[in-house]
Image (spheres, grey):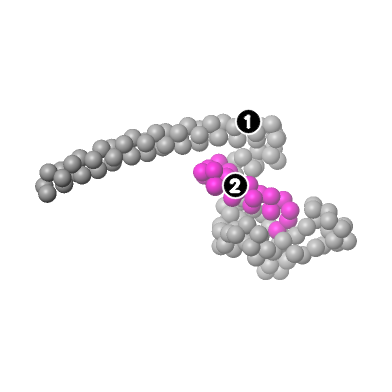
Amino acid sequence: MLLVSEKARQGDPALEQFSISELSQEFDVTTRAIRFYEDEGLLEPRRQGRQRVYSSRDRVRLKLILRGKRLGFSLSEIGDIIDMYDSEPGEVGQLQYFIEKISVRRKTLKQQRDDIEVTLKELDGIEKQCLKSMTHLD
């Protein structure tokens, strides 16, 4: 990990810096994915020559991006949620928006679960019919 000052060496997280490979290893994600998030405007590393230098803020944003993806949110939705933290109405607005998105996501997942249950019941019925037909053919 690159540290920029004595404060950083003493554990001031605001001054910590990370290379792309450090973040890649920490979060088990490819450097290509990290660069993609940068291209999408979700991460904003500084440059030291040709090397990308990520701040603690970028590290937290990457963690939130990956959490949002795991929960099924689009990158656009993730970006909106993250960006709201830095603007009005700030954290309260961010949390309200996130709660709305969670509600929509939950509704979608419940519908998918219901659809899967219906499909499984149909498959069970078809399987029983096939097994019954096989006993009559023997």
Mark 1 surroundings within 10 Å by alpha-carbon count, few (fewer than 14), some (14 through 19), many (20 or more) = few
Q: CA distance from mark 2 to mark 1?
A: 17 Å
Residue named by callout 2: 67
Picture coordinates of residue 109 (x, y %)? 46, 37
- Comes first in the chain, label 2 or label 1: 2
Please check the rendered image and state whether residue 18 is part of the magenta-colored stretch, yes or no. no
| Residue visible at 57% across and 62% down in the picture | 30
Q: Depth check: give the residue in front, 6 or 122.
A: 122
Picture coordinates of residue 126 (x, y %)? 23, 40
Q: Which image quadrant for residue 122?
A: top left
Q: Which image quadrant for residue 19?
A: bottom right
For mark 2, give the secondary structure: helix
Picture coordinates of residue 96 (x, y %)? 63, 30
Query: Over which residues does the magenta segment extend?
Result: 54-78
Q: Depth check: give the residue in front, 1 or 80.
A: 1
Residue 96: give its label: 1
Please check the rendered image and state whether residue 74 is part of the magenta-colored stretch, yes or no. yes
Location of the N terminus (image quadrant): bottom right
Rendered view: 105 above or below 5: above
